[in-house]
Image (tube, rainbow, N blue to C red):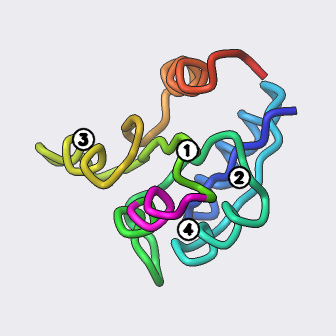
Amino acid sequence: MVKILYVEDNDDNIFMLSRRLGRKGFDIVVATDGKAGIEAANREAPALILMDLSLPVIDGWEATRRLKAAPETATIPVIALTAHAMEGDREKALAAGCDDFDTKPVELPRLLSKIEALLGAEP
């Protein structure tokens, strides 16, 4: 089972996306802030990370920079997720080290195609 770390602080988003991805065969691990996300990435060694950008403690931008700077987590693909997409946010996310970018509300088929492209296979 392919493990995905979902770093998100909104309970409704966690419930909805975790269930939908779980039904598609993914093993979902959740962290609710950027610091916990970094710790979970090191502990769980996920195949991919879905990173909300507006997070408490450490925001998603900085959490991604730290993950990509650490040899243990640098190769884990990160997809940035944001509900407040502004012009330039995609470029900013990619500059922070994200491998892709998607907006909320999540369109599952679009997100799944991005996940599959980064992982090279379905779950």
**Residue 94 at x, y = what percent?**
29, 43
* The stretch drawn in magenta includes residue 18: no
Tell me if mark 3 has few (under 14), some (14-19) or many (20+) residues whose alpha carbon lies within 10 angstroms of its own: some
Q: Quadrant of the C terminus?
A: top right
Q: Which element type, helix, strand or loop, lies under badge 1? A: loop
Distance Cα–Cα, label 4 vs label 1: 24 Å
Q: Is residue 71 left or right of residue 60?
A: right
Instruction: Report the front residue among 32 and 17.
Output: 32
Distance Cα–Cα, label 2 vs label 1: 27 Å
Q: Residue at x 37, y 69 (%)?
A: 62
Q: Residue at x 13, y 45 (%)?
A: 88
The magenta segment: 65-71
Q: Nearer the viewer, mark 4 or mark 1?
A: 1
Contact, mark 3 vs mark 2 (Cβ under 8 Å): no
**Residue 28 at x, y = what percent?**
77, 47
**Residue 7 at x, y = what percent?**
58, 59
Give the mark nearest the N terminus, 3 or 2: 2
User: Furthest residue to the right?
Assistant: 1
Kindly indicate the quadrant of the structure image that contains residue 63.
Answer: bottom left
Tell me if mark 1 has few (under 14), some (14-19) or many (20+) residues whose alpha carbon lies within 10 angstroms of its own: some
Tell me if mark 4 has few (under 14), some (14-19) or many (20+) residues whose alpha carbon lies within 10 angstroms of its own: some
